[in-house]
Image: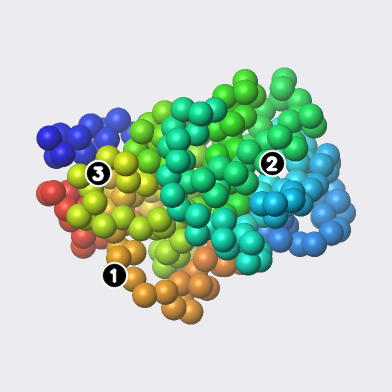
Amino acid sequence: MMRCFIWVLLFSVQAWAEPDFSMMKHTAQLSALAYVEGGKSTELESMGHKLVREATLPVVEVSYFLSVYQGMQYLTVRGTANLQNAMVDLDIHLKQDEQLGIAVHQGFANAALAIFNDAKPYLNQAQGIRTTGHSLGGAAAVMLAMYLQEAGFKMDQLITFGQPKVTNVGGANRFSNLKLWRVVTTKDIVPLVPPLSPLQISNLDVYWHMGEEIILLEGSNYSVTSGVKSMLRATKFVTSVPNESNLEAHKMHTYLTLIQSKQAQANEVPYKSDFSMFGFGGN
């Protein structure tokens, strides 16, 4: 039965358009800018954006800004920047969200809902919205897109960087229509958390990633995974020991450097992994 379930997941994955690395660079610059204290208006203007709202929200201590660029609204969420944010990251218990009708990571949900309530009065329901962010910011950006879609807003392309998981199999399926590119680097272990052990796969309440995973490789190369293949990458966490290399791989400047190397030319190559489970490999 479990093998049948995996087959269903493997072949029910929706494929979106090829990654647009110019758009990816643009949103990566926004995610990097989210870490800058003050002075965003000038930098955003140089990118062609008009700053509409910027706020640091109490209790959850999460920052975000809303800007408009060429008729598109961008909600950019800052990633982990202090101890309070780290505690949000560690709140990994799945809890049913009555508004969304799915089980979610409670810490990320609290952050996203706070942003949703603060930003809603400033949003134009007639215009499309893109959400983006790095690390915790990426996780909150995905959940924010869920709340916005449920409220009737028009969601466009979502792009996150080094984003951890936010929901389970049922939740990922419920919002599979969201156009999400999860951009990751090969040694960044944050996208692999909360961790998944092969022994837990029989429990359908395990954390599960949404969207397409864009793996940034060296030079002009990149790979794309999703569904089961993406899940198999996450099993590596159980044998990974965080080190300086993992930390460097998670930094926003690493993402920006790898994305920049794909501006002139980007070549998709198969993702290769020596891991397999229940007869499925990562290749």
Q: Position of residue 227 (x, y in %)?
A: 32, 42
Depth check: 29 or 196 in front?
196
The amino acid beneath tag 1 is: Thr
Return the residue at label 3: 203
Which one is closest to the eye, mark 1 or mark 3?
A: 3
Q: Is residue 277 left or right of residue 61?
A: left
Counting residues from the N terminus, which is met first, the one under dot 1 or under dot 2?
2
Which residue is the site of mark 1?
A: 239
Relative image position of residue 124 (x, y in whole percent)? 76, 25
Residues at discs 1 and 2 in contact (Cβ within 8 Å): no
Q: Amino acid at mark 2?
A: Ile
Q: Nearer the viewer, residue 257 or 279?
A: 279
Placement of 89 over or under 9, stated as above or below: below
The residue at the point 21 percent across, 62 percent down is 274
Residue at mark 2: 115
**Which one is earlier in the sequence, the residue at label 1 or at label 3?**
3
Secondary element at tag 1: helix
Query: Residue shown at 74%/31% (left/top)?
Result: 120
Between the C-alphas of marks 1 and 3, the distance is: 20 Å
Sooner in the amino-acid sequence: mark 2 or mark 3: 2
Label 3, residues with CA under 10 Å away: few <14, some 14-19, many ≥20: few
Residue 252 quadrant? bottom right
Instruction: Give the Cα separation between the discs numbered 1 and 2.
Output: 35 Å
Label of residue 158 in the image: none
Q: Residues within 10 Å of mark 1 (few under 14, many from 20)?
A: few
Q: Is residue 72 left or right of residue 249?
A: right
